[in-house]
Image (spheres, rainbow, N blue to C red):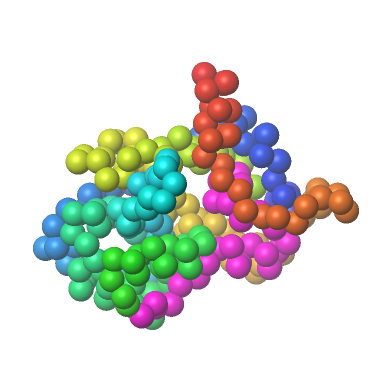
Amino acid sequence: MTKTIYDKFDKQRIATLPKEVFSGRIYTITTERDAEKAVNYLMTQPILGFDTETRPVFKRHMSHKVALLQVSTYDTCFLFRLNHIGLPDSIVRLLEDRTITKVALSWKDDIHGLQQRRQFKTGTFVDVQDEVTKIGIEDYSLQKLYANLFGKMISKRQQLSNWEADFLTDAQKAYAALDAWACIQIHNEIQRLQKSHDYHIIITKSENESETQADNPAVSEQEHEENLS
C-alpha cells in the first residue's frame, strides 16, 4: 500500500494519535566499568540511535552540561548518566567510531554539548534531518517526523524534567530511550521509501508561509495531552 506523507505535518493532529512506546530493555549506566561493558556490546551492533538530555534552564545566564547520553539498538537502550561518570574513554571510543551506522537528529547540537564535557573527534553519524529532506519532508522535530511517518505520537512531557536528579523516574527512562530508538526507525523508513518509491507526498504549505523550521514541541504538546486527559 502506498504511504501518504506530508511535507509539513499538522501539529494539531499529533495529540489525536496513539502514543508510541519503547518496549525494549533499558539499562541505566552510572559507573565507568559498566560504561565499558555497554560500549563493548554496542560496538557489535549494526546500527545505533543516539540522543542526549540536558537539565532545562529556567533563568537567564545559567547553563548545564549534558546529563544523559542515550544509545539504542533495535531492542535495547543504554542511558549513560554523564553527570555521574563524565565522558570516559569508552564513550569517546564510541563517539569517534567510523564503522557503525550511527543515527541521530540535530546531532551537531548534541556534539557541541558533549564536547563541553570533553573534546573528541566526531565519528560518522547520519542525521535524519538531512535524510527526510530527500523525500520532500520539511519538518525537523522528532515528534513531527515520527507522527508523519508512523502515525503515532512521541510524548514530550518529560522533556523539561530534571535530568540531573539523583534517580531517573521510569517515565524519564522510557522517554529517553524512545527518542534514541525512534531515530533508527525513522532512518530505516526513509531508506525503505527511497528504495521503493512507494509513497505519495502531500504539499501543505502556502506561498506566504514562513520557512522557519525550528520549533520546540514540549510545552504545546503537553497542553494538548492535558486537554485530552
Taking the image as drawn, is residue 68 in sight? no
Q: Residue at x 20, y 73 (%)?
A: 89
Q: Residue at x 67, y 34 (%)?
A: 12
Please check the rendered image and state whether residue 170 is part of the magenta-colored stretch, yes or no: no
Q: Which residues are magenta?
A: 121-147
> Which percent across, then down, holds residue 67?
30, 53
> Which percent across, then down, holds residue 137?
70, 58
Q: Quadrant of residue 91?
A: bottom left
Q: Residue at x 41, y 67 (%)?
A: 111
Q: Is residue 86 left or right of residue 133?
A: left
Please check the rendered image and state whether residue 133 is part of the magenta-colored stretch, yes or no: yes
Q: Choose between 41 and 203: the one closer to the eye.
A: 203
> Which percent across, then down, holds residue 187?
53, 62
Q: Is residue 200 left or right of residue 123?
A: right
Taking the image as drawn, is residue 4 in sight? yes
Q: Is residue 129 left or right of residue 125?
A: right
